[in-house]
Image: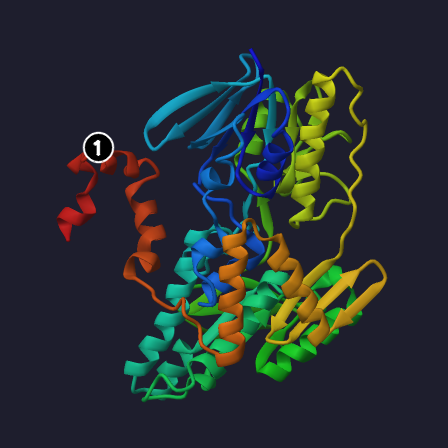
Amino acid sequence: MPHRVVVIGSGFGGLFATKELKKADVEVTMISKTSHHLFQPLLYQVATGILSPGEIAPVTREILAKQKNARVLLGLVEDIDTEAREVVWRYHNRTERTPYDSLIIAAGANQSYFGNDQFAQFAPGLKSIDDALELRARILNAFELAEIESDPEKRAKILTFVVIGAGPTGVEVAGQIRELASKTLRHDFRNFDPAAARVVLVDGAAHPLPPFGESLGKRTQRDLEKLGVEVLMSQMVVGMSDSTVTLRDRDGNEQVIESICKVWSAGVAGNPLGKKLAERTGVELDRAGRVRVNEDLTISGHPEIFVVGDMMSLDGVPGVAQGAIQPGRFAARAIKDRLAGREPAAKFEYKDKGSMATIAKSKAVVKIGKLEMGGFFAWLAWCGLHLFALTGFKSRLSTLMRWSMSYLSRHRSARAVTNQQLVGRLALEALGERASGHLLVDDVDVHPIAKRN
């Protein structure tokens, strides 16, 4: 029987680990809660109508169709039986167990609200296609509400967008909402001027993009402010409701911003699977709930288990795409070395390939080692790298066409929204996490909300 490798997650870490095992004498089973491989760095472009989901989320089965030693199972991993060496997972309400000889855990991370999980109801994060579609619906529906609102004060509140977190995602979302309002939508409404929208970017740091350094951070702030984004730094979010955000500065002064559309892009929390693994193995978790791994990306006492990507905690490895791709490949190579009777590398060494963030059309910042660059050429570099990093020729071609259309005409073709996108997340929470299983088998008892309405 071939060596059985189970890979949990279809993100960068899981996909690149699986592809690295293509020619190995192993049987690879990938278990993922989504049917696609998500190129998360471009998720904000789905949320702001530039790209459609399919262009950044190709189907995993299609990507791996020619890899004969790999199969894909759609399901949510809920536990890992380390004694029996089995992964416990479910597809809706059907529970399964899949055995493994080696295990690569790359289940990703969740949004962190720093102990204020109630904020999630009013300010969705941006970690999945569902999140992006919900945010697109929230953003575009705000403009629709403004069109039918006759009270100027109420309209101003409707047209105030607050983005919490000034990392790359927050900067990119704020810049794109500003461009959407001032350029894409400028001729689409009759009762108000979309350019009057207020976009506010909030963070507790001293400047945007802290990992990029002070120089690029301040440059980013200047570029955002030239676009019309209001940048509020050294401000912490201490309260939130459906129509307000409460901020507090370092001196304890508070201010309330009235806003019905808010985006949360601050903080990362470890996947809940990390807690299950800690219960099973005693492995230590960091403050964010990520798994502390050994230098070879395994966990103590279990050399057959690798943890990679956003789930792992290892000094010097950032939470970016390369921080998952390189560990995923390293883990796969270690498995191949063991099977070949070779001693695997004892220590993973991360190779920093730089950081990039786009601000708006023709504006971006790039940091590669000591090289710092901003402006148009940085934007071209950002476009080229992200286009190349997309999986599959079709995704690259369609994305290039969408970008070209958006750049030349200022139009965005992915602006359709539905009420399901707007309310789906909260509705599913009300129904319960296993409601979908009942829906598939037509169990009408799961529809009490629909019956009442």
Q: Residue at x 46, y 41 (%)?
A: 62
Rendered position, 149 above or below 313: below
State which quadrant residue 8 falls in: top right
Type of residue at label 1?
Answer: Val
Question: Residue 284, how many percent across, how many down?
Answer: 67, 30
Whether residue 239 can be seen here: no
Rendered position, 151 above or below 167: below
The residue indicated by pointer 1 is: 441
Foreground residue, 78 or 11? Answer: 11
> Is 216 left, or right, of 131 in this rendering?
right
Rendered position, 189 above or below 379: below
Quarter of the image with the N terminus in it: top right
Q: Residue at x 62, y 75 (%)?
A: 231
Question: Residue 395, how many percent across, how many down?
Answer: 51, 55
Whether residue 152 can be seen here: yes
> Is 202 left, or right, of 441 in this rendering?
right
> Is 447 left, or right, of 58 in this rendering?
left
Foreground residue, 281 or 116? Answer: 281
Scheme of colours in the image: rainbow
Q: Residue at x 34, y 85 (%)?
A: 189
Question: Residue 331, how many percent across, how many down?
Answer: 69, 30
Question: Residue 260, how many percent across, how many down?
Answer: 40, 70
- Of helix, strand and loop, which one carries label 1? loop
Rendered position, 46 above or below 351: below
Q: Residue at x 74, y 44 (%)?
A: 317
* Count of marks placed on residues: 1
Q: Residues within 10 Å of mark 1 (few under 14, many from 20)?
A: few
